[in-house]
Image (tube, rainbow, N blue to C red):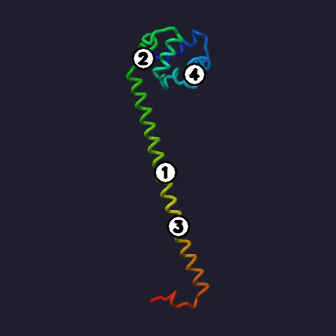
Amino acid sequence: MKFNEKLLSLRKQKGLSQEELGMELEVSRQTISKWEAGQSYPDFQRLVMLSDYFHMTLDELVRDIDVQDVREKKLTDEKVASMYGDLEKGKEFLNRCMKIIVYLGIGIMAFILVTFVLHLLLPDATWLWRTY
């Protein structure tokens, strides 16, 4: 029996809701739900609290846990976190690039506007509008 199945079975044998077990372990109901769904695993401190609460040894509680599955889950979580970090860095880079492009565009537009206004105000200033 996998850990998540064992936890679900033990909780139901005691007649507890996920929220009640969560309060005993000082975690949220969602955390208990993730443990029971096999989406995550409790840390060592919570494993000790679980074994005490269900009056089991740690060995009895965690026996049959596929350690490789836990390792793969951790590696997958780390990879996903790394991808999100890379995505955030990419967003920041694009935001900086967009700001530079916008500021350059505003600068060019301002230059064109100033030269146009000067041409309107000083049409006879040949020194300013000289063409070769």
Labels 2 and 4 touching (C-beta < 8 A)? no
The picture places residue 67, in percent across and down from the top left corner, at: 39, 20
SS state under label 2: loop
Mark 3 or 4, nearer chain start: 4
Judge whether 51 appears above or below 104 on screen. above
Picture mark count: 4
Q: Amino acid at mark 4?
A: Glu
Q: Amino acid at mark 3?
A: Gly
Seen at 58% across and 25% down, the residue is 28
Labels 1 and 2 touching (C-beta < 8 A)? no
Labels 3 and 4 touching (C-beta < 8 A)? no
Q: Which residue is mark 4?
A: 26
- The nearer-to-camera label among 3 and 4 is 4
Q: Amino acid at mark 2?
A: Ile
Marks 1 and 4, Cα distance to the nearest angstrom? Answer: 37 Å
Seen at 55% across and 67% down, the residue is 106
Marks 1 and 3, Cα distance to the nearest angstrom? Answer: 20 Å
**Residue 92 numbered mark, or none:** 1
Marks 3 and 4, Cα distance to the nearest angstrom? Answer: 55 Å
In the picture, residue 119 is in which quadrant? bottom right
